[in-house]
Image (cartoon, rainbow, N blue to C red):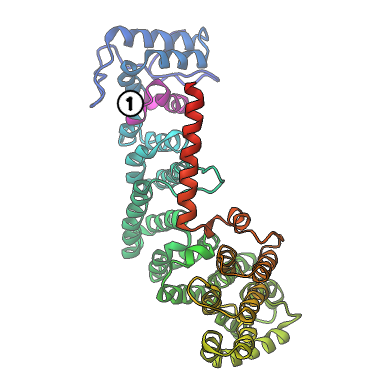
Amino acid sequence: MRIHPGVGVVAGVLVFALPAAAKEVEIKGFGTTPPALRKQIRADLEAHARRELEREQLLARFVEYGDPALPYLGKLLQEEDTRRARGPLLRHLPRISPDKGERLLVTLSRSSSPPHLPQAVAQTLGHVGTARSLDALLPLLDHDVSSIRSTAAEAVLMVWRREYKQKVDGVFAPPEPNVQTRIVERARVLLVKGVKSPRHQEVGTLALYLLVRTLGIRALNDVQLALGAPHLKPDALALFPEFTSRGNRLELDEFSSYDLERLHDVLVQVLRFPDFGLSPAELLQRQKSALSGLAMIGDISHVGTILEWLDEDVPEEEAPGVLRHATTALKRLSGEDHADLDAWRRYWKEIEEILRDYELYVEQVKEGQEQEAVAALSEIAKVRDARTFEAIAWVLDLDERETPETIGLAACGALARLRDPRGIPPLVKLLDTRLASPGLKERAAWALGLISGRPGPADPAHWKAVYPFTKTPEDLERERLAAEAAAEVEQATLDE
């Protein structure tokens, strides 16, 4: 069986339209495949078409030929009639040449002929590409063909995920700064393009999708920008579940008070935005994501925001479905559990009264007499708020000030009542100071057990292992020195 240009694909066989022998086979930057090797590749392909050479054997031969085969194979990939055979060979290019194979993929991504080649290259780079593949993928995000844009976006995310390195303790580090920066910068340029013109709505939506997936809650500015463009607003709202699910309390600690207020405003806007023709299930999912975001911020005033929304904006027929998610958010915000909305309203009324005198209570905690400070702690312990945790941490910092034992015990009790992860660092720090009494340390360990749901000893090393974010710079330096010492011992043993 002889292969002719234009022959279709035989099942299980890679069928290529072979360039004529005299056809130019140079690809800029990759040189020219020697004539003898071109002849051998043609013979291999013909043998494969006659089923005398299995596909894996054929690809293995290409790998054996190495770099010199790349220009000719690149030309084969640019032939229209090789479309269905293209994928396996594209995936093998990095095996043929780990360095030049990926560079050839990047070059082929810029080819306009055949029209489907850039999409096939993007799919391949998604599976095998390194950070270098962004040279091909990022420009494709603005391609004229919608399917190529979306394929490139998914490939970018696959490359981005591979840049995460798993540490020994199981914590994932962020990708290389250059990778993150390049993706974010390119996506933001395209988002602005989408915001400026409804003609580029799809490009803007795709850019926002990338920003939300890579930055999570830190894409606040980008989400707010998209919400301000009427043609992008529905798409931005549709991405909201992704936006709020990719945030955590520690990331929000880096937000300024101004940014937290802006985030609150965006979340409330999502809650109160018309349903835009969504199905009941879709609307509920969107409301759930906004409620989850409000709970994540951890500002006690959001209890009032949610109750006001339920009273004013939720139709009676929608209330049963919404109420379960609203109650979950109220519990996360307050640390309380009440039977029904009337009970929550009574609770909120009590909190509002405390908030009116809140600054006075904080002053009494820090400066008041023992009895006065203990009473004030019992009041602010009802308020799950950043200011509460700051005040209690101030009291428990025995390295900076002398705190009477009674107040210290009450402060630990207040954190136990609040049962919030923000109470963990000051308690671990308390365990780590020589200035705390055994009784106070036992009380701190008890509070940590209630917060974590896992009782443990009054040993700071135990809790730092459970919560690595509580480690001090001194702890990290000691760990580094210990690791170096262990490595030196291991090397000395090997040398012997």
Determine the residue positioned at 48% across, 34% down.
Answer: 487
Q: Residue furthest right?
A: 339
Determine the residue positioned at 34% across, 58% down.
Answer: 188
Could you say which quadrant of the image residue 27 lies in? Answer: top left
Question: Percent from the top left, x then y, of residue 104?
Answer: 33, 28
Q: Secondary structure at mark 1?
A: helix
Amino acid residing under circle 1? Lys
Q: Which residues are magenta?
A: 77-103
The relative height of residue 11 versus residue 3 in the rendered view (above or below) is below
The reply to whether residue 472 is visible in this rendering is yes
Q: Is residue 70 left or right of residue 60?
A: left
Pick the residue in front: 273 or 464: 464
Question: Percent from the top left, x then y, of residue 408?
Answer: 61, 77
Instruction: Name the residue that disc number 1 marks.
Output: 100
Question: Percent from the top left, x then y, of residue 492?
Answer: 48, 27
Question: Percent from the top left, x then y, of residue 56?
Answer: 51, 16
Could you say which quadrant of the image residue 295 lies in? Answer: bottom right
Q: Is residue 79 magenta?
A: yes
The relative height of residue 99 versus residue 139 in the rendered view (above or below) is above
